Image (tube, helix red, strand yellow):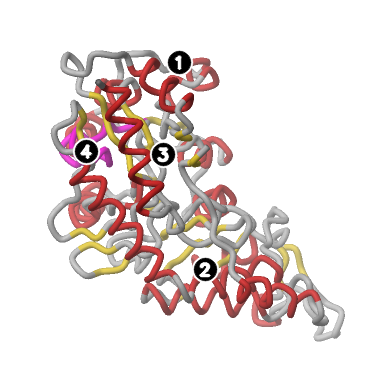
Amino acid sequence: MIPYGRHDVTEADVDAVVQVLRSDFLTQGPAVPRFEQAVAAHVGVKHGVAVNSATSALHIACMALGLGRGDRLWTVPNTFVASANCGLYCAADVDFVDIDPDTWNLSVPRLAEKLAWAQERGALPKVVVPVHFAGQPTEQEAIWALAQQYGFKVLEDASHAIGAARNGEPAGSCRWSDITVFSFHPVKIVTSGEGGMALTNDAALAESMAMLRTHGITRDPRRWQEGDGAAWHYEQQLLGFNYRMIDIQAALGVSQLQRLDAYVARRNALARRYDVALEGLPLQLPTVLAGNRSAFHLYVVRLKPGIAKKTHRLVFDELRRRGVGVNLHYTPVHLQPYYRGLGFLPGQYPEAERYGCEAITLPLYPNLTDAMQDEVVAALQQTLA
């Protein structure tokens, strides 16, 4: 089976982890701040806060932005559930904005329409979470302009998009957002085994998130409310969590980050090969906006209804029988049983729903060889025939 995604671990990665295992610190040592500084420097942002997953990063980002009961968070239905769940963790209400039919990212026109509608009803969101789906940046300038007009905070879910750029601006720089989140899950662009990071140019937000990841505790004398200068003194000032990344993970992340540019270049080369090889098939191929550089975490195609002669399910199952580990990213969040229990219904976000009935994620990762990719193409051609 050729999987849809796979990590790449080199001897240099192994050596980096072994060095930590032989050091004095397995956690709360120097490797985590080194990783934070390396990622922040790579994307040109001031602060990075590393945590144990991107889900945790989304959660503490929402908390740092002040999201709470009675507030609203909007995101897209075409994402992993964490992009929405982070709002529920804060006791906020969650709603969705439909996706663009070409990029499969948040639709700016739909967002503008919904904001105008919400303003009339006194129901504007406090936080909007655009998702850089499959590694392609969203139209952040336009979203940021709407944020200034309507007064909401922008939390970029760039879990798919480290190494991507929009008009030369790296994803994660927070030029058009308050906070950006990256994921370092094994199938993402670079990995720390598990892990995530929240990035921001706001020192106060960074400080708040750093406390929230560590039980809400600070050892910084400048922050103490009752400290007497004793060496043992620390204070819990917030109700936080144990969301810390450990040094073993961070060492792997630092090592992997050195190959980020090469990984993204290879993913783009494979995407171009797919574009050429799949032309003429009854498929909608990914559209990359002018000015965008996608990180191509995923390569997704959509069956063209009325032209493809087999159903979505038949094509998916047949590809798996042929040894191609295709996947679906994603079943729309609002159609998940939990969200239906909150009152969401089919038909509310039609473009995301059409997408979910047509999308197939094909294998794409740096160690996918041209020969393996040709096998995937042949299997898809035969299946669609």
Residue 185 is a magenta residue: no
- Relative height, residue 22 to residue 155 (above, below): below
- SS under mark 3: strand
Three-letter code, disc 4: Leu
Nearer to us of marks 2 and 4 is: 4
Mark 2 → mark 4, Cα distance in angstroms:
44 Å
Q: Which residue is mark 1?
A: 343
The percent position of residue 122, horizontal first and vertical second, equals 30, 32
Q: Is residue 104 magenta?
A: yes
Estimate the spatial distance between the alpha carbons at disc 4 and disc 3, rounded to whole Å.
38 Å
Numbered circle sitting on residue 278 = 4
Q: Are marks 2 and 1 in contact (CB under 8 Å)?
A: no
SS category of the residue bearing label 1: loop
Q: Viewer-nearest of labels 4 and 3?
A: 4
Q: Earlier in the sequence, mark 2 or mark 1?
A: 2
Q: Residues within 10 Å of mark 4 (few under 14, many from 20)?
A: some
Residue 75 drawn at (x, y percent): 37, 38
Badge 2 marks a residue whose secondary structure is: helix
Left or right, residue 49 beside residue 176: right
Quarter holding residue 270: bottom left
What's the amino acid at mark 1?
A: Gly
CA neighbours of label 3 inside 10 A, class few (<14), some (14 to 19), many (20+): many
For the record, the magenta segment spans: 96-110
Q: Which residue is mark 2?
A: 206
Q: Which mark is residue 73?
A: 3
For marks 2 and 4, the one nearer the N-term is: 2
Q: Of the residues shown, which amino acid type is indicated by label 2?
A: Ala
Task: Give whichever of discs 1 and 4 has the lower sequence position.
Answer: 4
